[in-house]
Structure formats: structure tokens, C-alpha cells
Image (spheres, coloured by chain):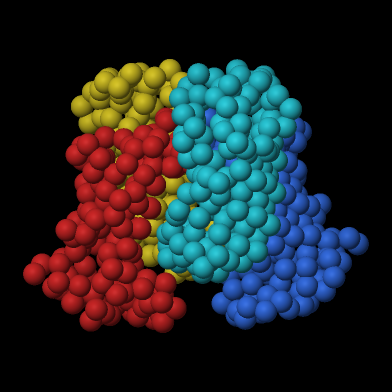
Chain colours: A cyan, B blue, C yellow, D red
Amino acid sequence: MFRVSMQVRDYECDLQGVVNNAVYQNYLEHARHAFLHHHGIDFAALTREGVHLMLIRAELDYKAPLKPNDRFEVTVCMVPEGRMKAVFEQKIVRDDGQLMVDARTIGVNTCNGRPARLPAELIAAMDEERA
Amino acid sequence: MFRVSMQVRDYECDLQGVVNNAVYQNYLEHARHAFLHHHGIDFAALTREGVHLMLIRAELDYKAPLKPNDRFEVTVCMVPEGRMKAVFEQKIVRDDGQLMVDARTIGVNTCNGRPARLPAELIAAMDEERA
Amino acid sequence: MFRVSMQVRDYECDLQGVVNNAVYQNYLEHARHAFLHHHGIDFAALTREGVHLMLIRAELDYKAPLKPNDRFEVTVCMVPEGRMKAVFEQKIVRDDGQLMVDARTIGVNTCNGRPARLPAELIAAMDEERA
Amino acid sequence: MFRVSMQVRDYECDLQGVVNNAVYQNYLEHARHAFLHHHGIDFAALTREGVHLMLIRAELDYKAPLKPNDRFEVTVCMVPEGRMKAVFEQKIVRDDGQLMVDARTIGVNTCNGRPARLPAELIAAMDEERA
């Protein structure tokens, strides 16, 4: 499974001394884009061409909070849903194996503002993953 | 219903020219804390006393993206779930009435790291809202 | 003098319980863009046309830290420096008159990646301010 | 010289398609904290004990903008200034050797809100660096 290693940075922590809830979405997005990049899909380049992968839903189950200096991995598993949507199942797991966040996001592809078929590279990436 | 008025700031927008997905969680958190503050609950003060309201789940449905300078409101409706949890139903609505994000977050109260009853002021706030 | 009123949001605070140092640059940028917008210059629109106002230098003197819920104003005073640069003198002042940050940023105008004359509207805005 | 390797994440980029100006301060702070950590100083632990290293000044010269996926290093060089202050000279250098940001920040140590001598470990770290 595709995974990205990261470490908590102090500025990502809030008053409570733990990583702020919104920051986990940053981690998840970064891992998704790294996943796409790994499969030859450059998010910034697509954006310049008017192709936008837009999130339409995010579900996050917060199991335990990450703290300063914690090391963790973010996994990415992508499954197509019809021709225009992709579902990303992601986990954030601390170095010691503790599950911190269990997430599911759904993205839809759009081209110049209209729903569009997923890029062929993305379909190929999903097939690769499942193989 | 409790609501907070806000406006998109350019630094909240990303490569795609719209508000980044994670930023909506910032908006939602800010509105929840404003709601608590409105009901006499100071989040920062509670935190110093070891009382932490921790999110355990967040669900966001992204309906349409906010753009630079857009004005919007974030609503907050809180419902207790048992003695230790609170469910927040929130909407982000653009000035022209367009629903941008429909969200539901669940928080659990903890005191020095252990699940604890919701603070009495919070129960009172929820009763006030429903009255 | 041009000024924008803002209030600290809890998610902008870090482990130390005060607004994180980087966030003041967000506040300053937001006030600069509001200043431009007030003078008929839309930053996002300029960007789409290939005109980029890029910071080349920022100086911030941190006098006292903003805390949760603090209300404050950010002032903007702009002075041209030659034909392609603008200097922004900005202050962040808490509601009770306490100076929190004293800042000076220098921006240069670029068009499709090359230094370019400041947009005419910006020159007009600077003249207006000084009048 | 102490250095930390990092890579641009897409969510750090703004409307202009480059890393937002404020984010460089995040990078610089992260590198300073990693430097402290490397020398046995835990920023989060110090904070809990009431010892706060507060920035009093930041100067950033932006030379060229970082873009999506760029890899870079952040260097840290610390010099004491009197008994209570430390000056950090930092550079952000892209993989190909291009200098992106040249920065200088000054921090003062405080203990329970009052200026205080720099922690002994920090003095030792500065001596180590210069040796």
C-alpha cells in the first residue's frame, strides 16, 4: 500500500498541545497528492489545465491525537466509484502502530467547472494499486 | 440559530484558486468556539484546567467552493449524545444563500485525559439553544 | 489610515497559548489585500492576468503576543519606491491600544515573471493615501 | 551547519501557485525547533515548564519562490546576543543550490513572562555549533 512518512511540526499543534484537527486534512491531502505524483499525475499541472479533482466529502475518525515530534505514516488506497469519482481510504498511523485517524474522502473530477471522467492516468493508477 | 459571519482571506486559497479543504475545518472550529464563548465557555481557559473537548469524528460534505472575498456564515447547532458527547451540526452558507459545506462533528469531553461528563455550562447552552 | 479589524481565532494559537509567529504574516497579507481591494485592485484577478505582486522583504518586530479572543486592528500605509516597488508600513494594534507587531514589507511588481511597473491603480491608490 | 531537508506540500501554495509568504516562517520555525531538539532541548517540554523562547524580530529576504514539489534545505546558525537573546541566521536553499530565502530572527528567553537567561543547554548548543 502507498504510504508517506511524516513527522509532527510544532507549529501544527494548538492550544491543547496536540495537532489541530484541521491539520490532519493537510496530511491526508499531501499523501493523496504524493500518491498521484507517484503514479505520474502532477496535481499542479492538472490544475493549470483546468482539470480539478474536487473533494465532495470527507469523513475523519479521530482515534488519538498526534503530539509534537511524533512520527507517523499516512496510507492511501484509492477505489473508483463510477466514471467520475474516486474514493480514498486513508489511515494515519503513529510509529508505534497506534491508529490515530481513519479517513475516507470522495473526490469528483471536473474539467472547466463541469463533472468529467477521471483522467486515464488515474484509472491506470487505481488498477495498478489493486493488482 | 447561532451563526458567525466571516469572509474568505486570500491566504486561505490554494493552487486551485479556491479555499483549501482543510480550511473549512478551521472555519467550523472557530464557529464552535465562538458558540461556546457566547454561552460563557472559554475554550482556552478550559484547556488550562485540563478539560479538553476533543473531536472524535468529522463529516464534511463539500457542496461548492468558496472563492477569494466571498462572504459567508457558519451556523452551529449542538445536541448532546449521552453524558459525555456533543454533536455539532454546522452549515457554511455563502451570502447569496448557496450552501457551501454541510458538516457534522462529534466531540467528547475529557478531563486530564479521561472521558468525562460534559461541563454543566455546555449542557445549559444546549438546553438554551433548544428552548 | 487604512485599517482592518480582526479577532484572534483559537486555531491560530500554538503550544505556547499565543498566536503563532507565522500567523501575523497572514494578518498583514490579508490587510494589504483588503487595502488593494478597497482601492479597486483585485489580487486574485491580477494573479489570473499574470501580474504578481511579490514580497521581496519582510521585517516584523514582535512587541507583545496576541492571545485567544483578542481583538485588534491591522493598519496599512503604502509608499512607492521607484517605479516597480511598493513599501508597506503596517502595525498590529490590540483593542486597548497596545502595539503588538510593527512591520515593514517590500513588494515588487512582476508581469509574466519579469519586474514591471506598478499597476496604475496602485500608484493612484498611493497618491490617494498621501493626499 | 545544522540543516533540515523538506519538500513543498501543495496545501502550502496559494493563488499565485507558489509557497505563501507566511509559510516560510513555518519552515524556519520548524528548523529552529529541530535544531534545539538535536541539542537536547524540547520546545514543547520547555513551554510546559513556563520557559518561552519568544521571537522579538524576524527579517526575511525572499529571493525566489518555492513551487509545488520543490525540495529544499533549511539551515540554522545560532549566535548568542547578551545573556537573554539568541540570533538565528537561516537560509532556505533549493535542491539545485538556488537561495530562496535569507532570514534572521532574534529570540528572547522568558520565564513565567519575564526576560530570563538563556537555558544552559542552549548556551552549550551555541558553543558546540561554533566549535
In the rendered structure, the answer to whether residue A97 lies left or right of residue D9 reads right
Camera sees residue C80: no
Residue at image location 57% in from the left, 56% down from the top: A92
* Residue sitting nearer the eye, B53 or C83: B53
Residue at image location 26% in from the left, 21% down from the top: C114
Residue at image location 68% in from the left, 57% down from the top: A61
Q: Residue A5: horizontal and vertical position, in percent?
A: 45, 53
| Quarter assignment of residue A76 | top right
Q: Residue A88: horizontal and vertical position, in percent?
A: 64, 41
- D57 lies above or below B111: above
> Residue placed farthest to the right in the image?
B131
| Quarter assignment of residue D33 | bottom left
* Residue sitting nearer the eye, C3 or D131: D131
> Residue placed farthest to the left in the image?
D131
- D21 lies above or below C9: above
Total numbered circles: 0
- C71 lies above or below C81: below
Q: Residue D86: horizontal and vertical position, in percent?
A: 21, 67
Residue at image location 53% in from the left, 45% down from the top: A2
Q: Residue D85: horizontal and vertical position, in percent?
A: 22, 70
Camera sees residue B78: yes
- D100 lies above or below D41: above
Q: Quadrant of the N terminus of chain D?
A: bottom left
* Residue sitting nearer the eye, C55 or A59: A59
> Residue placed farthest to the front in the image?
A131
